[in-house]
Image: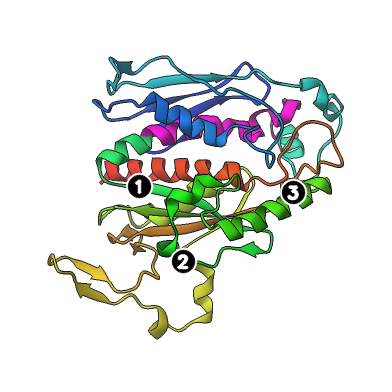
């Protein structure tokens, strides 16, 4: 299960302290101009050491494309790529040869395979998500030509929650703070909390919200390939993800149907729309043309800074934002190609 997708497919390989992380993208349409500067910028949003809120491990995370591109365009053949590892401190993990860290994959990998790479978590390390970000960046370039955008941001850290509806946010401000929250006041509160937690040698969790705009009607394959189920599967496959909901989500259990039903109306251009969007842009497992929005809950990092050596994040949220976008982009492109 190292391959994601149906038609647009990403197979990833590599370990945290191995030679490289890499992948093969298959099913990418031909003739897409591969904007390598954009892809590199997406990797820079994910890489370690980008701010005081993240792990101190420093990696250039430069992507090298090996195949599937000719004269700057995709050819329709498999796109191979690698990102070399450089700043490993493998000795930091020597004692883990004989120890299982609480709430990590150490124990389950050992029991399942009878062997494990204990250096930085090996294959279970979040460094594997490099491949997902590259795949997601390529998917974003294809979606861009279809008028589809995917935007994620940090909406909660611990008890600090952004209460402003996404339609009132200025998404251009997401990258203006290291925590990637588009509201400056809330962002500073989140930053203060993460710094306090880091100083205590502890960790904290939170929520990443994502908005997908320009998605056409008709994406989704009922009954067992519903779009929201595919998005949920993609998000819950991210390291440290513990929950997923879309549209009104769990908040809807407190309301009545008369309060949350999305009534249809005819727009000025003659198309049908809904006056509200409690469904989150998906009805019956199929996109309805409205914005798709969802949330992903991330647990506190299992590695407590006061308990072990090595370099770790006090909060995964800032670096999880581009990973959420990447998985959403690959899912939407895959289901667009299925349609």
Which residue, given by chain and number where applicable, does mark 3 sit on? 195
Indicate which disc residue 165 carries. 2
The reply to whether residue 188 is visible in this rendering is yes
**Within 10 angstroms of label 2, few (less than 14), some, or many (20 or more) residues?**
few
The image quadrant of residue 242 is bottom right
Q: What element carries label 1?
A: strand
Question: Is residue 130 a member of the stretch shown in magenta?
Answer: yes
Residue for point 41% across, 26% down: 37
53, 96: nearer the viewer: 53
Q: Where is residue 143 in the image (x, y as percent from the top left)?
A: 31, 41
Could you tell which of marks 3 and 1 lies nearer the N-terminus?
1
Q: What element carries label 2?
A: loop
Question: Is residue 253 a member of the stretch shown in magenta?
Answer: no
Number of residue marks: 3
Q: Where is residue 313 in the image (x, y as percent from the top left)?
A: 71, 40
Question: Is label 1 in contact with label 2 (beta carbons under 8 Å)?
Answer: no
Question: What separation in Å lies between label 3 and label 1 (alpha carbons)?
Answer: 32 Å
Indicate which disc residue 82 carries. none
* Image position of 170 with respect to 331: above or below: below
The reply to whether residue 1 is visible in this rendering is no
Is 192 left, or right, of 78 in this rendering?
Answer: right
53, 69: nearer the viewer: 53
Which residue, given by chain and number where applicable, does mark 1 sit on? 149
Task: Name the chief secondary structure element in magenta.
Answer: helix
Magenta stretch in the rendered image = 112-138
Q: What element carries label 3?
A: helix
Q: Where is residue 46 in the image (x, y as percent from the top left)?
A: 56, 36
């Amino acid at each position: 299960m190292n391959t994601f997708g149906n038609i647009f497919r990403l197979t990833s390989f590599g370990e945290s302290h191995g030679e490289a992380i890499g992948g093969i993208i298959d099913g990418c349409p031909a003739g897409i101009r591969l904007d390598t500067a954009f892809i590199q910028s997406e990797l820079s949003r994910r890489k370690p050491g980008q701010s005081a809120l993240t792990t101190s491990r420093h990696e250039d995370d430069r992507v090298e494309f090996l195949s599937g591109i000719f004269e700057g365009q995709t050819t329709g053949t498999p796109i191979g790529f690698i990102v070399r590892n450089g700043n490993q401190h493998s000795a930091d993990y020597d004692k883990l040869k004989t120890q299982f860290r609480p709430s990590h994959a150490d124990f389950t990998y050992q029991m399942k395979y009878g062997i494990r790479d204990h250096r930085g978590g090996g294959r279970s390390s979040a460094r594997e998500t490099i491949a997902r970000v590259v795949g997601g960046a390529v998917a974003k370039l294809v979606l861009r030509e279809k008028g589809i955008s995917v935007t994620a941001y940090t909406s909660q850290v611990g008890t600090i929650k952004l209460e402003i509806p996404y339609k009132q946010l200025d998404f251009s401000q997401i990258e203006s703070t290291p925590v990637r929250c588009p509201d400056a006041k809330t962002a500073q509160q989140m930053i203060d909390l993460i710094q306090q937690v880091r100083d205590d040698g502890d960790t904290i969790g939170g929520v990443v919200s994502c908005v997908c705009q320009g998605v056409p009607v008709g994406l989704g394959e009922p009954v067992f390939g519903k779009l929201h189920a595919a998005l949920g599967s993609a998000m819950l496959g991210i390291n440290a993800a513990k929950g997923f909901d879309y549209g009104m989500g769990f908040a809807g259990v407190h309301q009545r149907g008369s309060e949350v039903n999305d009534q249809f109306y005819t727009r000025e251009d003659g198309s049908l729309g809904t006056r509200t969007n409690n469904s989150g842009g998906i009805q019956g497992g199929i996109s309805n043309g409205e914005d798709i929005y969802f949330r992903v809950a991330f647990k506190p990092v299992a590695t407590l800074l006061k308990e072990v050596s090595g370099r770790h994040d006090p909060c995964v949220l800032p670096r999880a934002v581009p990973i959420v976008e990447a998985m959403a982009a690959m899912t939407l492109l895959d289901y667009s190609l299925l349609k």
